[in-house]
Amino acid sequence: MGTAAAGDGVRPLGAPPAAEHKVNLSARRPFVEALRTGLAETLFPDDPFRGFGSRPPAARAWGGLKYFVPALEWAPRYSLDKFKYDLLAGVTIASLAIPQGISYAKLANLPPIIGLYSSFVPPLLYAVFGSSNNLAVGTVAAASLLLASIIEAEVPPEENPQLYLQLFYTAAFFTGVIQTALGVFRLGLIVDFLSRSTITGFMGGTAAIIILQQLKGMLGMKHFTPKTDLISVVRAIFHYRHEWKWQSAVLGICFLLFLLSSKHLRKKKPNLFWVSAIAPFMVVIIGGIFAFLVKGNEHGIPIVGDLKKGINPLSISQLTFTDKHVNTAVKAGFLSGILALAEGIAVGRSLALIKNEQIDGNKEMIAFGIMNIAGSCTSCYLTTGPFSKSAVNFHAGCRTPMSNVVMSVCIMLVLLFLAPLFKYTPLVALSAIIVVAMIGLIKVKEFSHLYRVDKFDFCICMVAFIGVVFFTMVIGLGASVGLSVIRALLHVARPNTCKLGSIAGGDIFRDVRHYPHARNIPNVLVLQLGSPIYFVNAGYLRERILRWVEDEENACKVDGQDLQCVVLDLGGVSSIDNTGIGMLLEVHQNLDRRGIRVALTNPKLQVTEKLVLSGYIKDKIGEEWVFLTVKDAVTACRYALQRSRSKDDGEV
Amino acid sequence: MGTAAAGDGVRPLGAPPAAEHKVNLSARRPFVEALRTGLAETLFPDDPFRGFGSRPPAARAWGGLKYFVPALEWAPRYSLDKFKYDLLAGVTIASLAIPQGISYAKLANLPPIIGLYSSFVPPLLYAVFGSSNNLAVGTVAAASLLLASIIEAEVPPEENPQLYLQLFYTAAFFTGVIQTALGVFRLGLIVDFLSRSTITGFMGGTAAIIILQQLKGMLGMKHFTPKTDLISVVRAIFHYRHEWKWQSAVLGICFLLFLLSSKHLRKKKPNLFWVSAIAPFMVVIIGGIFAFLVKGNEHGIPIVGDLKKGINPLSISQLTFTDKHVNTAVKAGFLSGILALAEGIAVGRSLALIKNEQIDGNKEMIAFGIMNIAGSCTSCYLTTGPFSKSAVNFHAGCRTPMSNVVMSVCIMLVLLFLAPLFKYTPLVALSAIIVVAMIGLIKVKEFSHLYRVDKFDFCICMVAFIGVVFFTMVIGLGASVGLSVIRALLHVARPNTCKLGSIAGGDIFRDVRHYPHARNIPNVLVLQLGSPIYFVNAGYLRERILRWVEDEENACKVDGQDLQCVVLDLGGVSSIDNTGIGMLLEVHQNLDRRGIRVALTNPKLQVTEKLVLSGYIKDKIGEEWVFLTVKDAVTACRYALQRSRSKDDGEV
C-alpha cells in the first residue's frame, strides 16, 4: 500500500471483506481466439457461413455457391404463381424505366438511348447476383448529375461528346471495380460513413438544384451552364432569357399538373399506385403524339431526336485508361459508386424490413459491382437501385428479382422495335417527369425532425444541403461526411463520465444529474466511466476523474468528512487500450498518494483481459478491490472504513 | 401494438405491472444548457474558472490574469529557501544545455551557436507563462532531425545555408502560432491523437537513426547523406569510407565509455545523478582541451569551429513568407510543433504526477507557443521541454520555473564571455553525447509490454518504428497516427454487444461469455448494447441484434419454447444519434412483427433526452416498457408472459 501515503500520515483502508460475487478474472481468451472474434465482428458481422461446419463438404460447397449466387437459392423454388406477380411488377417498372432512363441520361448530358441501354443489361445481372427481392435496377438522378458535374469539368460534352461518353463508361467500370472490391474485402463499413443525415441533406440539395436545372427544359432553352450551383443556374436562366419558349412552358405546366395529381391520387388511394407509376410513361406517349401532330420541333417544343434501333452495342473498346483522364474517371467512379451503394443498400434494407426479409450489404455490393462492370462494357453508365423504381416494384407486388428480368425483356423489346418512336418525346415532358420525381426528395419534415431531436445531426444535414446548393455536389458531400467523422472522433475524445448516487435504498446506483433524488454515499465517490477508454481520451479522463475527486473532497470538507474511497464503475467501458491502462495507473498512484482507495467494478470481458495482462489488477489495485457490482464495492468500502476507524479509536 | 403481428396470429405481450423503480424520463435539459455542457466538456474539461462566479470583479480579474500568467501565482510567494534549490537545479541543467544545444544544432545542420541561442530566450518566457514547475526548456533531438529532414528536401543546407536557417526560424514561428492557437482555442485534443504507442515507436525509431547518423561524427567523416532512412545512412557510411579517421573513432569510444559509465553509476546510486548530469559538459571541456593541445583539427579530429561572442541577434527580418517556401515552413512547423507539444506535455504531466501537482495542457500550449514565437524572432529554432533535461531538473530539486531563469542567465554569461572557448569542441564528443542520450529512448521493455498487453497497440508502435527507420520520419508518424485513428473509428464502427445471463439467483445480469455459469432466462433475451450508437455502427448493430434474436429463437425452438421478449440494456450507451434512433425503431418494428416485445433498460441522461424527443419512447415502445434495471425488465416480461399464458389457457 502506497508508501508515500504512509509518509503523509494518511492511512489507506485495509483489505475489504470477501465480496459476495466475484469478478471472473480468469476468463482470458487466447490471442488467436480474441483476434478471430475481433476480425469476425469487424468483417463478418452477419456471419454468413454459420452452421456450415456441421455439413458434409458437398453441401458446404453448394451452400457457399448459393451464398455468392442468390439466384440459385430462389430459382429452384420458383413457381408460376410467383411469376404472375413478378410479371405485373416487371411491366410496371419497365413503363417507369423508359421515361426515367431517357430523362436521367439527358440530365447527365448523355444521348438518351444510353438511359435505355442502362435499363437492359444491369437488371439481368442483378437478378442473378442480388440478394434483395424488392430492388429494381436503373439509373439515378443524383449520381447522374454528380458524374456529369465531375466529368464536365474535365471534358465539356459539346466539345468532345465521344470522349465524354467514354469517360462515363470508364467511370462506371471503376465504380464496378470499387464496389466489388468493397464487397469482397467486406469493407461495407465505408458506406456506413454516409449517415442518414448526410444523405437526407445531400439528396435534398441535389433535388433542389435538379429542379432548378429543369427550368431549362421547361422553358425550351437551348443553352445553359454546366455548373450546378444555385447562383450559376439562376444566372444562366436569365442570361439566355431570349430563348424562352411559351409553348414549352404551357405544355410543361400541363404535364406537371397531370403528374402531381396522379401522385396526389396515390396518397389518397394507395391501391391506385399504378396510376402514378405509369403516369410518366403516359406523359411521354401523349407528349410524343402531340409533338408529332403539331410538329412541335418547329413551334418551340424541342424534342429528343433520333433514337437508334437495336440492343446495346459493346463498349469495352471505349474504356479509356490514358493517364490524362483516368484520375477524373476514378474520382467520378468512386464518389458516384459510394453514393449509389448508399442509396441502393438503404433502399433494399428499408424494403426488406417491411417484408421481414434480410439483405446482405456486402453481397449487394458485389452484385452492384458486377452489374456496373458488365454495364460499362455494354454501353451502360452507372446503375443502382433507385428509390422511386424500387418502391413501385415493391407496391406492384414483386416476389423475386425475376421482376428485373421482366423489365429487362420489356426494355429489350423497346430497343429492338419501338425505340425510334420515342424520337418525338418533348424535352419538356422529361423535365416535368424529373421535377415531380425530385420534389419528394426534399424532405422538409425530416429536416424539422432532425432539428428537434439532434442539433448536430441537423447541422450535418444542412451542411450537405447548403454545400450542394451553393457550391458543388462534391463539396457538399465531403463537408458533411467530414463533419460526421469529426463528430464520431469527438465522441471518442470526450466520453461521458458521471457521478453515481444511490437510489432505492442503496441497491441501485445512477447518475445524480439524471436522478436528482439520488443520495450521496458518505466518504465514497462512485464514478461511471464512459466508453471506450482510448489514447484519444485518456488525458481527458485523467483530468476529469481528478477534478471529480477534488470537487468531492471539497464538498466532503464542508461536511467535516474525508473522501476515502473512489469506486470506478467500468460497466459501460467496452474497450481499453494501453494508454488507457496507463491513465488508470496514474490515477491510482495519484489517489494512493492522497490516501484514497480505488476500487473497480464490473469490468467487461475485453477490459478484464487487458487489466489482468498488464498487471494492473494484481500488482496495483489488488484483486480484492475489484467487484462485480457497485453495491458490493460500496459495502466493502464502508466496511473497511469502519474497521479502520474503530482501529484508530482503539489506538487512541 | 403491431397490426402485422396480429395478422400472423402472434399475440404480443400485454402491459407489464408497474415497475418498482422508474426511469426519469422528464429529466430534459434545455438545448442551451445541453450545448453549454457539451462545449464545456469538449473545450474546458479542466474548467479553469470554476468557483470564480462567487468572487468580486477585481478578484476575478486578478484570478484570470493569474490563470494566464502562472508566474504571478508563484512569484509573490517566492523565497530564498526555494531559490537555493532552483539555483542548484538551474546550474546543473545549464551544464547539460550547452553540450545538448550544440549537439542538436549540429544534428539539424545548423550553426552550433543557434543551439546556445535557443537555450537563452525561450526558457525566460517559459518561466513566466509555463505552468509546470519541473520542465526545463531546450531543443530536442527528434524534432531537430524532423525539421532538418523536411527543410533539407526543399533547400540543401550546403547550397544556401542562409535560406536554410531562415526556414528554421520561419518554421519555429509557425510552430509558435499553431501552438498558441491550439491552446487559445483549447484544441489540445489534437495532441491526444499521438498515442503513447505512437510516441514510443516514433521516438525509438528516431533514436535508432540518430545513433546511426552519429557514425559520421564518430568516424570523423565530412560527407554524408541528407536522408534519414537506415539504408541510405548505411550506404553513405560505406560510400565515404575513405574519410574514416581512426583518431576520431578512438576518442569517440573513450567518450562513449565515460558517458555510459556515468549513466550506469546513476542507476546504481541515484543520489549521484549529478555526475551523469554534468558528464556531457565534462566531455565537452575535456575534449576541447585535448583537441586544443594536440591540434586535433589537423590530426583527424574535426572540431566545431568558430563561435561568435554575444547574445542572440534579432532575426525577425529573416522570417520568410514568400510563396515558394512558406508551405515547407508551415508543414515543418506544424509537424514538429505537434511532436514537441506531445513530448513537452507528456514530460510535464509525468513529472507533475510524481509531485502530485497538476499541469494544464492548454496553458502549456500557450506557453510553448509564446516562447517559440519569441524564439523565432531572436535567432532560436524550435524548443520544448525535453525529457532528459527536465528529468535532471526534477532530480536536482527544482521548486519553481525559476530554475529555467537561472539556466538562461548561465547561458547568457556563456554567450557573452565564453562562447569562443567552445570552438575546440571535437565533433566526436558531440556525437558521443547524442548517442548516449538516444540509447535510453529505444525502449525495448516497453515494446515487449505492448506486445503482451495489446497486439494492436504493438502494431501501431512498430509501424511508427519501422516507418521512421526504413522510410522517413513523416511517413512513420503519419502511418502510425493513421492506424490509431482507424482503430478509434473501427471501435466506434463495431461496438461490443453481448448477451446477458443471470447470476447470483437472478439479481445480477452479466455477459454469458465472461461468466459461463450465468443462466439463460427462459423466453427472454437480454442484450447489452455497446457505446456509442452512431450512424457508423447503426447498420451493424441492427444486423447484430437481429442475429442474436435469430440465434436465440433457434435455441428456444430446440427447447420447445418461444422467444417472447428482447430486453435491450442501454446502461453502457453514452450517446445516440438520429441514425441510431432510426435503427432502434427498425429493430422494434421488425421484432414487433414477429410478436416479440422490446423493453429498454437504464438509458442514460443524454440518451433518454433523445429517445423522448424523437417520440420513440412514447409512440413506439411505451413508457411502461422502459425500466431502470435489467431485473425489473425481466420480472415484468415474465409477469406479462404468465398473464398472457393464463389468458390463452382461459380462452382455450
Image (spheres, coloured by chain):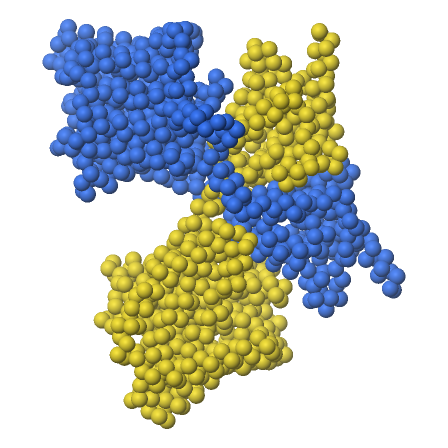
Chain colours: A yellow, B blue
Which quadrant of the figure has residue A557?
top right
**Residue depicted at 52% across the width and 59% down the height:** A448
Residue B373 percent location from the top left of the image:
27, 29
Look at the image and tell me whether residue B388 can be seen: no
**Residue depicted at 47% across the width and 66% down the height:** A442
In the image shown, does B194 or B229 lie closer to the viewer?
B194
Q: In this view, does B620 lie above or below A390?
A: above
Residue A341 percent location from the top left of the image:
46, 61
Q: Which residue lies furthest to the bottom in this view?
A: A293
Residue A48 percent location from the top left of the image:
57, 55
Q: Is residue B633 above or below residue B423?
A: below
Query: How many numbered circles does the render carry?
Result: 0
Left or right of residue A476: residue A160: left
**Residue depicted at 45% across the width and 28% down the height:** B57
Residue B594 percent location from the top left of the image:
69, 61
**Residue depicted at 73% across the width and 52% down the height:** B624
Which quadrant of the figure has residue B250?
top left
Quarter that holds the N terminus of chain A? top right
Quarter that holds the C terminus of chain A? top right
Left or right of residue A280: residue B332: left
In the image shown, does A171 or B485 lie closer to the viewer?
B485
In the image shown, does B82 or A142 lie closer to the viewer?
B82
Look at the image and tell me whether residue B560 can be seen: yes
Q: In this view, does B135 lie above or below A465?
A: above
